[in-house]
């Protein structure tokens, strides 16, 4: 299933980014890497749980939102312009949407 493959690859990237943030970066770059990794890894797990619950829509929002949120932070940590930070909240909005959608699906 493609969502599981994407979640697994996302988890691997999150671990790598977190390790680089902890050991190879400093200052704001280290914080961006750590924050991105934390959100990305949590939402990988959320996506896998959502898939197990047969909540595919929320799972896709978790994977897509985590990718946008984390990758914009990673890009800035690696030297991308600071305006990339304006894209980050789009990922956050998708993550929030995923949680709300999951709650809606679980209500019955």
Image: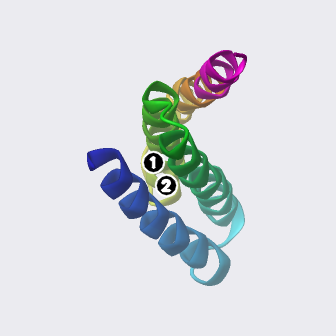
Vertical relation: 101 (above or below) 28 = above
Residue corresponding to mark 2? 74
Q: Is 8 or 23 nearer to us in this picture?
A: 8
Vertical relation: 70 (above or below) 106 = below
Residue corresponding to mark 1? 71
Q: CA distance from mark 2 to mark 1?
A: 5 Å
Q: Residue furthest left?
A: 2
Which residue lies at the image location 52% right of the left edge and 42% below the top edge?
Answer: 66
Name the side, left or right, on which 55 lies relative to 35.
Answer: left
Q: Main secondary structure of the magenta part?
A: helix
Measuring from the top left, give residue 44's x and y in whole percent.
Answer: 53, 52
Dots 2, 1 in contact, CB < 8 A: yes
Instruction: Check disc 2 and report its element: helix, strand or loop.
Output: helix
Which residue lies at the image location 55% right of the left edge and 33% below the top edge?
Answer: 88
Q: Which image quarter: residue 37?
A: bottom right
Instruction: Check disc 1 and report its element: helix, strand or loop.
Output: helix
Name the side, left or right, on which 33 lies relative to 13.
Answer: right
Q: Which residues are magenta?
A: 98-108
Locate the C terminus and report the quarter of the image it occupies. top right
Q: Is 89 or 62 nearer to us in this picture?
A: 62
């Amino acid at each position: 299933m493609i969502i599981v493959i994407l979640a697994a690859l996302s988890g691997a990237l999150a671990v790598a980014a977190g390790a680089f943030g902890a050991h190879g970066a400093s200052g704001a770059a280290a914080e961006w890497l750590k924050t991105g990794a934390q959100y990305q890894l949590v939402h990988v797990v959320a996506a896998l749980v959502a898939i197990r619950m047969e909540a595919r829509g929320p799972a896709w929002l978790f994977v897509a939102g985590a990718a946008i949120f984390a990758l914009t932070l990673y890009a800035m940590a690696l030297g991308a312009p600071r305006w990339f930070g304006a894209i980050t909240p789009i990922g956050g909005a998708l993550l929030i949407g995923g949680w709300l959608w999951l709650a809606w699906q679980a209500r019955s």
